[in-house]
Amino acid sequence: MRIVRSMSKLSLSAALLASLLALAAWKYYPQAAGNGDGRAIWRKSLHQGTETTMRAEMTMTRRKHGVTYTTLAHIVQGSQGRYRMEYLLPIEARGRIVFSDAHSNWQYEPAQNMLAKTELPVPSEIKDRDAEALIESNYRVVLVSDNATMAGRSAYLLDLLPKHSGKSSQRRWIDKQTYKTLRIETHYTDGILASLVSYDQLALPATVTEADFQPMQATGIRHVSAPASAQEIQSRDFAQTAARLHLKSQVDLGFQLVGIGVSTLNNAPTPQFLYTDGIETLSVFVQKAGADIVNTPDHWQRLTVSGVPVFQNVDGHLNTLVWTRFGHRYTAVSHLVTHGLEAVIASELR
Amino acid sequence: MSNCEGLQAQLNSFLDGELDAAHSVSLSAHLEECPDCRRELAALRSTQAILRAAPVPDGKQAQQFALATFRNSLAAERSVPQRRPLWQGALASASAVALLAWGVHSLTRKPGQASAQPESRQMVATTIGTEGLPTADELDEMTSLHAARSFAISPGDDGVQQTTLADANSRLSLRSR
């Protein structure tokens, strides 16, 4: 009898605990059961939000290998992908101006008084609906709050939670009036802030003119231009083309190959394979292998991934992994957090 | 503009002393009047100096090839045109397709397979990077290319685009241009 009573107490306690946990989960993620609202806000931020003009001061930080890198710039955003950024930080970039009219990208370097024009690549075949489907297959979009405040404006707070373990999550503040993204935090799986993009001193919507996105006319500026790189391979041929260079079209963590192009690097044609999971992107460049990598130079670390020696660059903002196989040298660059990039490359090497 | 473009194509030969006397005189006269072409000539000269100073372990043939290829890419640079003629767009597209085909082909060619490329091209490829790894300039360029392509495929996500571009541009130094 005593045993039965003890078991009843135990069951009651378990039920109580389960109820409390459920309540806590419901409080924290009120839309977790049906996150249709979160998805709808997310979609609007992708379409309506990007067509809203804005002037702001942009701060971007990225934490990597114990160092925080900070970029600070005045930014002007027009519709249809037009933008202008004037750099304040880092110090070595101060005075740099980067702008685009959505067809070409210009970069002004004050030290050289040089304006470099680069044609933007031919847009990929990936369609908005395919990209959205990819995002939804890889992330849960959760509305955390519809009553947040950011940069003095009323905002939605969304969480983008990866469905694959080992990937970072994102928290985004979306302006309620214009659906513009006001702040993005990317967190490592242990919760540490990996990167941050935020906008302050906002004018939203802002007055912009064509002159904001056109080359400056000052005298003495040297103009240079680089030809557009090729991106002519049809998506139906992706798998075959990748296989010829010992790469895959589908890799771990939900990444798939969405573009193949060739640019000239060090006077040699260099194929670039672009993968995405809908939010994060990853490029793999393929070159002929050079000398054997015997030593590990400064700013590099040697790892072993799927039994293959892989070299990781520990300098700069992006994560970079390099390996050689079958007479080729492969260089993967991505914003993906380090262990995420390693997981993706491990599936390439298997 | 078209006169400049025609003359700028002769700058390489002019620097190498390979231009005949009549063309040299004509080009010199034009250079006295044209600041754009003088800047182009200065850029070519400095590029030559940099490339000549750089160690190329595979010898003079590879060095000459690197120099010629780099000159060609510089010669393709030009002052930003106001409007690009239709035929130039078609030519650029055709070149892009050819470049793509060459890129994939050159990397997938089996080692023993007969090659139509000059031997020096393969020799240059082996000089890429330091100790077998990409150089800082190469990483900058790859970062920039990654940003540009991510921009093109990103589904309207301006936050992601700006993050990528800001990162890329904070690294890109244009040292190699």
Image: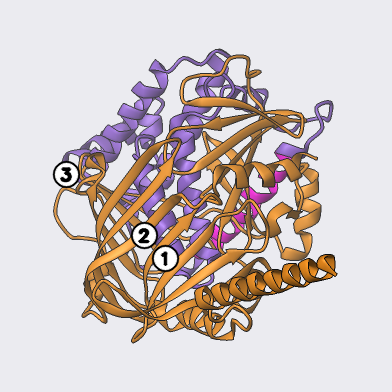
Residue A249 percent location from the top left of the image: 75, 55
Task: Specify which label sits upstream in the sequence, 3 or 1.
Answer: 3
> Subunit of mark 2?
A
Amino acid under disc 1:
Gly
| Residue extent of the magenta highlight | B89-106
Say if residue A184 shows up in the picture.
yes
> Subunit of mark 3?
B
- Structural crowding at the residue carrying mark 2, measured as other residues with C-alpha within 10 Å and reported as few (<14), some (14–19) or many (≥20): many
Circles 1 and 2, Cβ within 8 Å, touching? The answer is yes
Q: Colour of chain A?
A: orange
- Does mark 1 fall on the same chain as mark 3? yes
Q: Secondary structure at mark 3?
A: helix
Amino acid under disc 2:
Val
Q: Residue at x 16, y 44 (%)?
A: B33
Which residue is tagged 1? B159
Pick the front one: A212 or A197: A197
Q: Secondary structure at mark 2?
A: strand
Q: Residue at x 80, y 40 (%)?
A: A350
Which residue is tagged 2? A197
Q: Colour of chain B?
A: purple
